[in-house]
Image (cartoon, coloured by chain):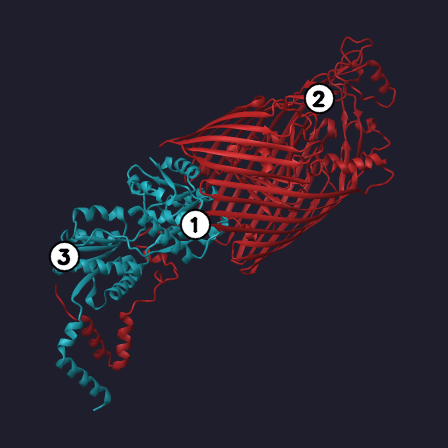
Amino acid sequence: MPFGARFCLVIWAFLALCPSVFAQEAPQTVAYLAGSERNSALTSHMMNLLTDALGDDAEIRRFQPGQTSQSDGSVIITLGPEAFTLVRQESRTAPILALLVDEPFIAGYAERSAGDIGAVLYNSPLIRQAMAGKVILPHATRVAMLATPESVELYEALTPRLPELGMEGRVFIVSDNDDLIPALVRALEYGDFLLAATDSTIYNPRTIKHILLTTYRRSRIVIGPSQAYVKAGSLASTYVPLRTTAESAAQQLAVFHQTGRFPPPVYPDEFQLEINDQVARSLNIPLPPREELRATIASRLSNSTEGAHE
Amino acid sequence: MPVTNPVANSSFHCFRRSGLSVPFALMVATATLLPAPAQADSDAPTPDFSGLGSVEPPLPEVLTTTRLRQPKSRVPGTTTIIEGDLIRDLGVMNLVEVFRLVPGMTVAEVGSNNPVTSYHGTVHYEQRRLQIQVDGRTSYRASLSDTDWHTMPVPLELIERIEVSRGPNSAAHGINAFLGTINIITRSPDDTAGVQLGAASGSRGYLRAFGSVGEASAPYSWRLAYEKRQSDGFDKQIDGGEFYPFNDGHNINTFSYDGIARLSDQISLDLRGGVVDGINEEDLRKNGKLGATDNPDIMVDDYYLQTRLNVTTSTNHFFHFQVSFQNYQRRQRWPICISGPQIDSLLEGNPPDFDFEPGDCSAGDDPAPLIADLNEDIEESRLEFEIQDTLYFNPNLKLVSGLGYRRDTFRSETFFNGRGNNYQSRAFGNVEYSPFQWLTLNAGGNWETTTTTDEGYFSPRVAANFIINNNQAIRFVYSEAVRTPDAFEQTPDWSYRPRNVQAPYKFLEGVRFRVEDLVDPTTSTFGIDLDEERIISREISYFGQFYMDSALLSLELRYFNDQLRDMISGVINEVDWFIANNVGLDQEGFEMETSVDYAGTKLRATYAYLDQNGWYTGDPDALDAGDQDYVVELLGRLSVRHSGSFSWIQQLPFDLTSAATFYWADEFRRAQFERADFRIARRIYAPKYSYELAVTMQHYLNRDQDLSPDNIISDHNQFFVEAGVRF
């Protein structure tokens, strides 16, 4: 008998005699991952990261349309608002862990279906973004923000917290399209930097060119709302790495499996900082190394939170 | 929840089907289960924006290299940037006063309160050794090459920033960028949508009103702006130990229209146009000529048109083509009264007696005097073309190159006996090469021909910037530049033709009295060709920025050593005309510009030290010793040994902002200039509008007049109030 065949026989025998060994190491749960058809690379990448984060405790399978009717209550992990909406339309009772969504999008669902809908938010909390602005411009005392009447509540929780960072803030309301530039100009007169939340009514592909160019010409900077905007010309933004998102998702799943309920949507504590070095150089803003800035932001946020709790 | 072990099964099936060896199969299985190489997750972030494409919309890269400004650390020379916000926060009341904030620049008033500014001084009248551009439009006058700051169509509210390149910059901007370059950049109509109104009023009849309205949209943005500038000028003048009223105010109105049409993502078209209209008062006693009996006020009527086509072919290549036309029209007419014996003596060919005093002559005198009108009307226009191409071969190698053509036309019966033209053509280029992160090399030059001398000139500049930690740089710069004589210096055909002549001298109507025949013949150089002035400049400068706990410190130091040769100096008026390439200057010194931004506090300081030595290099027999000293001294009238400024802007509670600024220049011809400005402003931001109220006090610490004894301000405290609204 060739060596290969003999080796295979040994393996078969081992499997037949020791099933309990494998039963103990096998995943206990299955979760389905619903990604975007338009970006299968992202879905595959997240599949790997989630598998890595969950280890042997769970298995991740690709979500198939109609899955919710067969999954017997398995958690469905969605990537992005589009995937979430599709799954949600398919079943209003299936437990969903939403990833790569922002708070304004998921907050309503999470509130209405408390426990059944969990989320790991991909956007950065505004207080962290504001701190990033303060660390980059240590002399900053005023934060300007732009919002529509509908999105102004995005900044509601932030404004009273800015004094903790040694700053104050003001939201400039944009009532309609024609109002954007006048409001922006007034905002830039007020603020040392413009803090941008994930607010597609203000910051979107149609407006971002105008906002960034006007801000740059005024020698002001934009902080946020995300990595993609930093590439476009925003000076900096904190962001949650996908690996951190996956690890946080694993924690949410663990809680769900223990309690049968998801906790409210969470911002992962770990974050990274993206910087547009070219814009910083052009505006003559000296920047320490990225990791040093990130550590300073984290440290000051920690101190600020501790101080607030005291 | 169903529990299965699909991983083991699938791996196994794979193994069975493939027939591969178990170790290899296990390796494959393991590899597929491990995470893919992190793209967006590594500890040292390498962003993968495409990864979030499903949750974020695709965004254009807005601030590409084509739109970014060159950082100071890589600029081939020291540049001061004054932001428009700083100008407004400090309560600067006139455009020219901004330059008191620039190290090495001096500001003064000559004649009937006509502002003049220079970098590293030289002459006070007809200061013409700076290239001055407004939005890329050459803005000094075509014939005399000096600058009329009163009528510059730049409202303070519309200044985005002013960049002053300190040191010869002919390599980039051509002849006349001899001592430096002022580049005034106004706000884009993209950034001024909405309505803005403002007004300021204060001492000595100061009044400024501003209004603008505009819209910004993707296909077209526009702005219409108006500004009124009015002042009574200085309070009084002194003549023969007695004080007299000083007719030296101005009342200027400017209208401007700016538009940007975006023809595609890669092509945009800038459109600009403006009109300047008003009166610049000239005083009879100060500027009255040839028996003037009334103030020779200047009526201003200017306009300009400008268009610029911007084409971006890629992120690494863009160019623009610009055309501008400017027309300056000055109408200056005054009545004269010359006594009968004086005019008769002149007509008999005797040397003229120019000792006129107001009141010496009147229409009823016996014998009858010459009663007529004289004028110094002039119309100047400039047509300018420029194409500039920028090419980024790679991030470390950039080339800027271009061609320019200019036609200066001047029409004046008095100064040129008709019409004249000067033509200038130039080619320029600059290569920036960064072979290492710590080194940036610049080499550039400008080749230019001009019909004023019918010669061509090459002005080179080379620079090496050694960059330390991205935040500090040491520059070594060598540059050469020339200034060619202007049209009036080189080709004057100056005469006066009496108009509206009354009896009994009606026969003199339109008769030409040539200044060439009037000036002192023993010293006259009238009609003698002048050569170009030359400068060789060497600069060692340092630029650094540092974080200091909660503050940002910026420091720029400049050492310079300049050799100026064949400098043109002398006197040109209707009595004397002796100018020549007759002075050499050596100058060296150092300058400092620093700012500290604390939370809520901004401190800024400048200092300049200038050691300038001049000597007469002209024909020893052309001028006597006194006049030789005089022409050397004239080239130092705006040069001061020590000068500087200190500013402190402080945010205060209740939306208040205070500013305190101290300016000094030690010292001009007569005294040092010392002034402290204090401003307190309250800016309120309402949901739909914001408004500002401010009070400014200017306190003159030194009450002696700096340059001219006539520039008398009676009260050493001057007050101004401002109000503005934006919505």
Q: Colour of chain A?
A: cyan
Q: Residue at position x 71%, y 25% from top? A: B376
- The mark found on residue B238 in the picture is 2
Q: Residue furthest front?
A: A310
Q: Residue furthest bottom?
A: A1
Query: Could you say where residue B370 lies in the image, as x and y percent from the top left?
Result: 79, 14
Q: Residue at position x 23%, y 67% from top? A: A55
Per the image, label 2 sits on a secondary structure element best described as strand
Q: Nearer the viewer, residue B487 or A186?
A: A186
Q: Amino acid at mark 3?
A: Gly
Q: Which residue is mark 3?
A: A260
User: Does residue A152 appear to the left or right of B188 in the view shown?
Assistant: left
Quadrant of the drawing holding the C terminus of chain B? top left
Q: Chain of mark 2?
A: B
Q: CA distance from mark 2 to mark 1?
A: 56 Å
Q: Which residue is mark 1?
A: A136
Q: Amino acid at mark 1?
A: Ile
Q: Amino acid at mark 2?
A: Ile
Quadrant of the drawing holding the N terminus of chain B? bottom left
